Image (cartoon, helix red, strand yellow):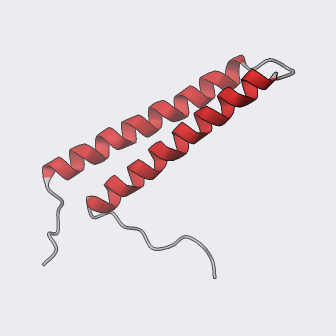
Amino acid sequence: MTDLYPAADQRELLRQAAAAHTAASRDVETFLRRLPDVPDPADITEYANLLTREEQARLDRQAAADAAGLQLPSMESG
């Protein structure tokens, strides 16, 4: 039988994953605020790395949400 409420440790892991995702998103915003008018190759590389980190943090957050019992139905339209 599935518990109605996730264990406290699952909720804490979810909070931590959400905080990590927020931090990764903030890092992208900070980068974009200082981005020069004409990005150079290093800027593009940094942006790609930041987006990769943010996406991984989002996936980790979603996995933690699933483990905590917060599965959502697909949001894709048929």
Horizontal side, residue 56 vs residue 20: left or right = right
Is residue 18 rendered to the left or right of residue 3?
A: right
Quadrant into which the C terminus falls? bottom right
Please tell me which residue lies in front, 56 or 10. 56
Measured as percent of width and height from the top left, residue 10 is found at 21, 52
Q: Which residue is drawn at 66% across and 36% down?
A: 48
Q: Return the x and y of residue 40 as percentages of the image width and height.
A: 82, 21
Q: Where is residue 20 in the image (x, y as percent from the top left)?
A: 40, 35
Q: In this view, does 16 lie above or below 39?
A: below
The answer to which image quadrant residue 52 occupies is top right
Quick check: 7 above or below 22?
below
Q: In this view, does 49 lie to the left or right of 20?
A: right
Q: Residue, x 17% and y 62% (percent of image)?
A: 5
Please identify the quarter of the rendering in which residue 68 is found.
Answer: bottom left
Q: Which residue is drawn at 80% across and 17% down?
A: 36
Q: Quadrant of the N terminus?
A: bottom left
* Residue 72 located left or right of residue 41: left
> Furthest-right residue in view?
38
Q: Residue furthest bottom?
A: 78
Of residue 65 and residue 52, the one placed in the foreground of this image is: 52
Q: Nearer the viewer, residue 28 or 46?
A: 46
Q: Report the label total.
A: 0
| 2 w.r.t. 46: above or below | below
